[in-house]
Image (tube, grey):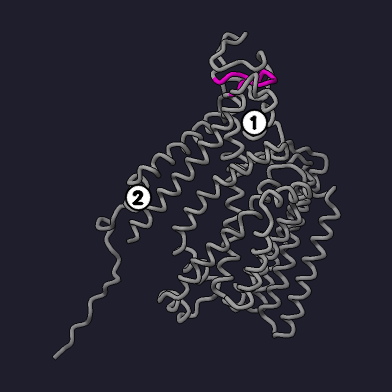
Amino acid sequence: MAIAEPQNTLEKIPAAARPPRWKKLRENLSIIFESRVATFGMSLVLFWVVLGFISLFWTPYPPNSSLFIQNLPPFSSNELGGINVLGTDNLGRDLLSRLMTGTQVILLKTRLPEATGSQYMNALTTIAVLVSLTSFFSILSAVNGKRVKRNLLLLAAGWLIVSVILFLVLRNVLPGWVPFVALFGAIYMSYFVYGWMKAKALDATGTMKVWSISLAVAVVFWLVSLPLQAVAVPGISIPIGVAIWGVIGSLIVGSILGLNAAYRGGGWDQAIMQLLDALIAFPVIVLYLVVIAALGQGDLVVILAITITGAPGVARLVRGLGLDIKTRDYIRAAETRGENIQYIMFREILPNARGPILVDAMLRVGYAIFAIGTLGFLGIGLPPPDPDWGNMVNDARQFIFTNQWAVIWPAVAIASLVVGLNFFADGLREELTRYQK
């Protein structure tokens, strides 16, 4: 009696029978709209986002121009025949225009520091060279024996320390943020390349190709910088605001630290947690002041400060989630298949922890906005000319008895945006918990 062969259940599903791609997006959006709290919070956030987008193309008046009588109340007529809807500040600038433009700085754009073209290219070249050299050391460490591996890792660590000291000395030549970007990029690249080389087991030819490509990037940056020696680069802006970039940096650094502490355990866990405990021991405002005092004012410096203060919290959250997820069956299955550590951490553990991390990220954007406002109020936040809500409060506080509206409007803006983000995060957390059950 012939045994019927089992049907192939993995045959490709016809296109007509597949669910539409937008179905999953619709389900995710339905989770948000089922919560009134999340919907209300999202509405507040979208209000400020839309207002910021409008200000990219139009504002009632130039935000930095003193065109009107000082300290006008809301809905006052001006000499240009228009109306100052929210009034004016102590310098005669329109408050609505400045409030709209301040949304850009927080949520929509980041200004790079003013420098010559050669300074920017030298900074990029420095980062590329450092990443290239540490990648080369890691490649050699991955394909050689234990003794060579140990010596080359010590050499790479020594090179990192010398490079950071050198960059700190050359702060007048290179922007102050370069040492920190180069250090993080080099450490992460060496860690990533080492794990990748061990997993792929490339031969000497393959390793040299990888290193040659990374070194070629540095050479190209240097060649491009030659004709840019005297070209001024006046404050280039890049998309996404300071608060969001700071949270993204916190998520990247914190996730890497938390995943390694959770999955590797042992000495990795102890060393990482001791480092995080040391950072958490300092008050947040003290860390902000230390970073800004060391590097000066600027959008990138504020992003770095937010990253440093936010990464420990993200790392502790990811570590707690990772300790629970790594005991599950699909992690054991990935280990049985022989997947490398990087694959398990970033493709198995991290995606399954995305719900709580997303909620935490929403809350951290609110913390970052509040921090930017605090630094602006202290006069050490984002530099002019772009208005910052905290700077607006600081500029108007001495006129609070004659023009209280100049203090009230930016304070209401900060409070409403932070409250909206908190409502959105709380509602999203409740719905995700209910949806998972």
Q: Do the CB atoms of the residues marked 1 and 2 lie less than 8 Å apart?
A: no
In this figure, what is the number of numbered marks? Answer: 2
Instruction: Give how far across and how far down residue 418 sits, in percent.
Output: 52, 41
Q: What SS does tag 1 mark?
A: helix
Q: Is residue 9 magenta?
A: no
Quarter of the image for residue 374 reads top right
Relative to 423, 63 lies left or right: right
45 or 220: which is nearer to us?
Answer: 45
Q: Which circle, 1 or 2, is nearer the viewer? A: 1
Please tell me which residue is depicted at 50% across the width and 54% down the height of the picture. Answer: 360
When the figure is inspected, residue 11 is found, relative to residue 26, above or below; the finding is below
Residue type for callout 1:
Val
Instruction: Give how far across and how far down residue 231 sits, in percent.
Output: 79, 39
Quarter of the image for residue 71 reads top right
Please tell me which residue is depicted at 72% across the width and 36% down the height of the picture. Answer: 379
Residue type for callout 2:
Ile
When the figure is inspected, residue 9 is found, relative to residue 5, above or below; the finding is above
Q: What SS does tag 2 mark?
A: helix
Magenta span: 86-95
Instruction: Give how far across and how far down residue 283 sits, in percent.
Output: 67, 53
Relative to 253, 334 lies left or right: left
Q: Earlier in the sequence, mark 1 or mark 2?
A: 2
Structural distance between the alpha carbons of marks 1 and 2: 37 Å
Please tell me which residue is depicted at 43% across the width and 41% down the height of the picture. Answer: 42
Residue with the mark numbered 2: 31
| Residue positioned most to the front | 401
Residue with the mark numbered 1: 393
The kind of secondary structure the magenta stretch mainly shows is loop
Q: Quadrant of the N terminus?
A: bottom left
